Amino acid sequence: MYAQMIKTAGTGVKPREEMTPEEAAFQDRIDADIKIEPKDWMPDEYRATLVRQIGQHAHSEIVGQLPEGNWITRAPTLERKAILLAKVQDEAGHGLYLYCAAETLGVSRDELTEDLLSGRMKYSSIFNYPTLNWADIGAVGWLVDGAAIMNQVPLQRTSYGPYSRAMIRICKEESFHQRQGYDIMMKMAQGTEAQKKMAQDALNRFWYPSLMMFGPSDKESVHSAQSMAWKIKIDSNDELRQRFVDQTVPQAEYLGLTVPDDKLKWNEERGHYDFSEPDWTEFFNVLKGKGPCNTERMNGRKRAWEDGAWVRDGLMAHAQKRAARKVAAE
Ligand code: BYC
């Protein structure tokens, strides 16, 4: 079933005159901002697009724990350690809410995980970059969680009920994540010369990968048009990227740091910053598995999945035993 879902995803926007009566009625509900719930009729492509997007989002939350989890034992103080630990645990929770939302569409968490491990499903490109030092943890919280919130706040209004409700919970926690990152950056930027240099270096390395998180330019985005017609996506990739730049540049200025872009300039006429596009060749290479940490991340997930097999088997055996006992008692 899931293979069929993947095959039907991303087939472009269907003109109204080609819609079946069911499809037209469905589109009317979307246009009227009525949420779609799991038992409602929905086009196969709508279901497939949601499984792809929610599944990839869930994988991103889980893989996203790896670059930060790596720093829990090396956080500079007990307080920083406790905060980072809480943040990484939150990411696991976000993954679980999202896997549950995907399950309401008829795909199991095991199937989704197997598709991640076999490379059939993606996770966010950003997590294929390394976190080399403590300033990187600040940059991840500030920029990566900042970009994630920029994308996720509008998704609270997404048309699919379970996804929308998961996003409302997630967004509450993401705001704390971004603040903790900015707080680390503030300490580093106001610290010694060496610490300020580390903060600047982290911004230099994470700036463009953060811009890539919003996906390819609108011209290259294959799914945006249909996803926006169905209100699975609320804003386009370029709209969100621009909003992120406009919000983040003054924050960098406040820190006394420089965004690594010679072309960055406030455009009075547009009311937005002009900025340089990321290197899209690099982005597509990362998607193909050629980023600095793709292999390490996938190996980490494979190991965790294999090491956890005995727990899943044990839980399954326990559940089967309980079910058998219940049947016997009836
Ligand atoms: N990385 O047609 P497009 C987080 C793929 S934050 C990898 O524009 P769409 C966290 C795309 O999947 C991150 N792949 O696609 C933060 C498609 O390939 P497929 C997670 C990407 O779906 C801190 C192809 O490129 N957030 O979780 O309309 C700590 C063409 O793109 C990326 C979400 O997932 C990328 N950056 O738009 C811990 C938010 N960009 O699938 C965790 C929900 C594009 O056809 N997702 N691709 O093989 C979305 O809003 C949308 O899916 C995207 C892409 C904006 C990401």
Image (tube, helix red, strand yellow):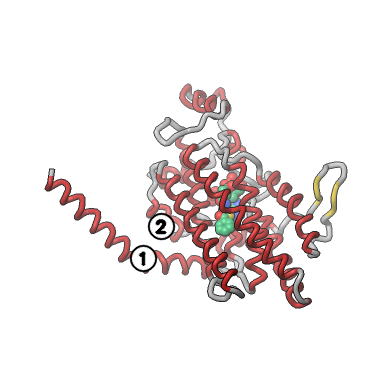
Name the image quarter holding the N terminus: top left
Query: Residue at point 64% right, 72% down?
Result: 134
Above or below for 136 versus 156: below
Q: Where 101 falls versus 70 (above or below)?
A: above
Q: Amino acid at mark 2?
A: Glu
Residue 58 x %, y % = 49, 53
Number of labels in the image equals 2
Report x, y in % for residue 153: 61, 45
Circle 2 Cα neighbour tier, 10 Å, few/some/many (<14 / 14–19 / ≥20): some
Residue projecting furthest to the right? 268
> In the image, is 100 to the left or to the right of 148?
left
Q: Determine whether the residue tagged by mark 2 lies in a helix, strand or loop.
A: helix
* Dot placed on the residue nearer the N-terminal end, 2 or 1: 2
Q: Does residue 203 appear anywhere in the picture?
A: yes
- Per the rendering, the mark at residue 114 is 2
Which mark identifies residue 308?
Answer: 1
Q: Position of residue 296 (x, y in %)?
A: 52, 70
Q: CA distance from mark 2 to mark 1?
A: 14 Å
Q: Residue at x 52, y 62 (%)?
A: 86
- Secondary element type, mark 1: loop
Q: Is residue 223 left or right of residue 322?
A: right
Is 35 on the left or on the right of 329, as rendered? right
